[in-house]
Image (tube, helix red, strand yellow):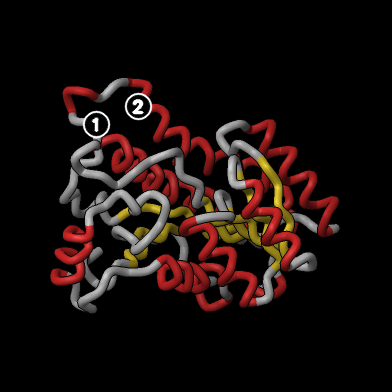
Amino acid sequence: MQIRDQIVLVTGGARGLGLAITQTLIAEGARVVVNYLSSKVQAEQLAQQFPNQVFAFQADVTDKAQVEQLFAATKQHFGSAIHSIVNNALIHFEFNGDARPKIEDLTALTMTRQFDGAVLASLNTLQVALDDMKQAHFGRIVNIGTNLVQNPVVPYHDYTAAKAALLAFTRTASQDLGQYGINVNMLSGGLLQTTDASKATPDAVFEIIAASTPLRRVTTPEEFASAIMMFLSPYSRAVTGQNLIVDGGLVKG
């Protein structure tokens, strides 16, 4: 199925990386479900600007009941079920190495909050989508990860552990769901310049990353969003259970 024929859910799709993903999908002609938690104004502006392509809906994706409401409202709005999901939403987090929780400060709550935002949220959207995707014998799930799993240069323990768990879930889900025509993959980025999460990062850190990267620049949200389109397109129909690192070549997968 071409991207232009799909209804794609982007969790956290109204700002930061999520906004870049939404804008790229709109340019590709897709219909986009922009899920948001607190970015009501930005989401509604997108829906007003692109009334035929964008449906905005508020839901906490860590709450399965709210996810069920999101999917039901989408089906009513577009008259069809969601075909693809980009699990992008991020529990409040800042890439600030000085302010990160140190091992001595980590708590079960801190770890669980990130796990819920990464793994539980992705489980919720997948479970609610599953019946329709099985019936269509088509589904594309793209989970957003991080290259810190492969190269934890800054030890963001809670965030990185949660994304590592999401990578494992991506691979086990792909094994279970391939028989139904559902592909599950992950795209892992480095520090993007700039998103809500990376705006606290000092300029010197971006300069160091750029100097160490083969492309000699820090990846932008728009560049990262473009790579997601590959996993949604027919060109990746035989690709599942994979983790593509999109960081300008800094980390080799």
Q: Judge by depth and name the residue closer to the eye, 184 or 197.
A: 197
At horizontal 19% and vertical 30% (from top left) the residue drawn is 102
Quick one: SS at disc 1? loop
Looking at the image, residue 46 sits to the left or right of residue 89; the answer is right
Residues packed near mark 2 inside 10 Å, few (<14), some (14 to 19) or many (20 plus) = some
Say the numbered circle drawn on residue 243.
Answer: none
Q: Amino acid at mark 1?
A: Pro
Which image quarter holds the N terminus? bottom right
- x then y, percent, for residue 213: 19, 71
Q: Amino acid at mark 2?
A: Thr
Looking at the image, residue 159 sits to the left or right of residue 36; the answer is left
- x then y, percent, for residue 162: 36, 39
In this view, 65 is above or below 197 = above
- x then y, percent, for residue 74: 77, 51
At horizontal 59% and vertical 47% (from top left) the residue drawn is 39
What is the count of numbered marks?
Answer: 2
Q: Marks 1 and 2, Cα distance to the nearest angstrom?
A: 9 Å
In this view, 53 is above or below 144 = below
Quick one: SS at disc 2? helix
Looking at the image, residue 153 sits to the left or right of residue 81; the answer is left
Label 1 vs 2, first from the N-terminus: 1
Instruction: State yes or no: discs 1 and 2 in contact (Cβ < 8 Å).
Output: yes
- x then y, percent, for residue 212: 14, 69
Which image quarter holds the C terminus? bottom left
Q: Which residue is mark 1?
A: 101
Q: Which residue is mark 2?
A: 110
